Image (cartoon, rainbow, N blue to C red):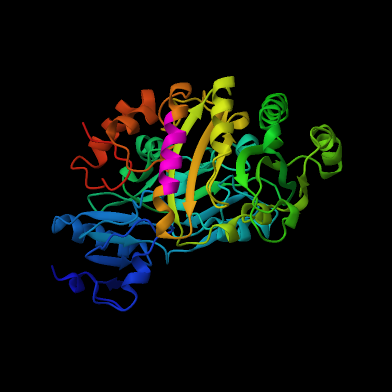
Amino acid sequence: MNYENLSDSSVFEVLTPKSKGYDDARAVYNAMIDKRPAAIAICQSETDVVKAVNFARENDIEIAIRGGGHNGAGLALVDDGLVIDLSKMKGIAIDVAAKTAQIQSGCLLKEVDAATHEHGLALPSGIIGSTGIGGLTLGGGMGYLSRKGGLTIDNLLECKVVLASGELVTANKDSHPDLFWALRGGGGNFGVVTSFKFKLLSIKNVYAGPMFWPIEKAKEAMRFYDTLTKNSSNDLYGFFAFLMVPPAAPFPEHLWNQKVCGVVWNYTGPIEEAEKIFKPIREFGPPILDFVGEIPMPALNSMFDGLYPPGLQWYWRGHYFKELTDEAIDINIEFGNEIPNFHTTSHLYPIDGAVHDVSNRDTAWANRDARWAQVIVGVAPEPEGAEEITNWCKNFYNALTPHAMGGAYVNFMMEEGDAKVKASYKGNYERLSSIKSKYDPDNFFHINQNIRPK
């Protein structure tokens, strides 16, 4: 195949295995992924994307869509096919009066945070600044503002989408409303989303940061945290974590490499009320580390970026939970005590509050009866550690499975098969499959957590 025919302009670059920069372009966040595309189309406009989609369809070429390249399963790449790379499409336009943002799909969360924060605004999104806005949004989007503002998709107003046919359409509540419904949680199954329009929240600074307790207090801490968040306003968010304290500043040296449990808090209410809100939290324990204070929202969203640079070995799995049973807590503590290194961790993300204000029928994301989404994250700096972190992750996941709700957040899945995808979409799967048949009947977009057309 002569991929050079795909590019007839200086701005639309096509890289092949012989091109300078090819290896850099095929590298993704998870270094465990080593796929070799036949070509990578570096798109800079919607016209470029249309051309790439048409070329692949007309020549029967498999495609993958790359935004931030953050997907753990490596679904941004495809062996011997064409990668449609959106990473250069980084336009952001903020309408301050309307509190909306138009964001192109190549943007990373840290870029979105910087643009919105300048105007005292924020988008409910994730917890790592290097995450791509495209993959995060299409999977649902959960993070520090979920209890306050819902999932990222709950703030989505519109998408520009290149369909399998090559047609560029606008999807919102009035135009292609079925497609708009499917895009809110249905992943990359329905087309190449080139830009998103979001509504924003008025948030600039928050009272936030990590707080740790000895792992010996984990059961008591999890029960305290569970009760506290259940009875708190939506202004208080915190995800519970098991971790090994990184051996580096700003963490105090006497805690380095200790296994601990903790919460990364985020309070979005009046700053003058923060000390009162956190008084009972600080009195519990007390914590052995307390880095909670007033910080800019982007500082919270990028707090762990330095700990997780691109190029590490990653393996992750996910669960949903309605409640934290004694059995689930005991399993978390067991595997929290076996964490193999300071990059590896497990997080329980609250998905109640404003997330529960939306019905499972209103978007493709079908897990609004859950209170928690758990991610079990095995990370190693070098390939030699890949087997150890993978086994720890799988064993932890398997032990929790009998106590979980079934399915998983699709952004926390590896390539786990059709049954797991169906379980994740529950009663919405059949509708998604019908919409897939309408917009992509040949399953052209299938390098994803795939929803098969009827």
Compared across the picture, whether 288 is left or right of 358 comes to right
Compared across the picture, whether 177 is left or right of 120 comes to left
The residue sitting at 26% across, 41% down in the picture is 439
x, y percent for residue 385: 43, 54
x, y percent for residue 28: 40, 60
Bounds of the magenta span? Answer: 388-398
Compared across the picture, whether 177 is left or right of 109 comes to left
119 to 19, vertically: above or below: above
Q: Is residue 48 visible?
A: yes
> In front: 198, or 339?
339
> In front: 133, or 27?
27
Q: Is residue 325 visible?
A: no
**Where does the N terminus fall, quadrant-wise?**
bottom left
The residue sitting at 14% across, 57% down in the picture is 58
Name the main secondary structure of what is drawn in magenta.
Answer: helix
The residue sitting at 70% across, 42% down in the picture is 265
**Where does the C terminus fall, quadrant-wise?**
top left
The residue sitting at 61% across, 31% down in the picture is 354
Residue 27 lies in the magenta-colored region: no
49 to 218, vertically: above or below: below
Residue 389 lies in the magenta-colored region: yes
x, y percent for residue 360: 46, 25
x, y percent for residue 46: 35, 61
Image quadrant where residue 432 sits? top left
258 to 18, vertically: above or below: above
Q: How many labels were placed on the picture?
A: 0
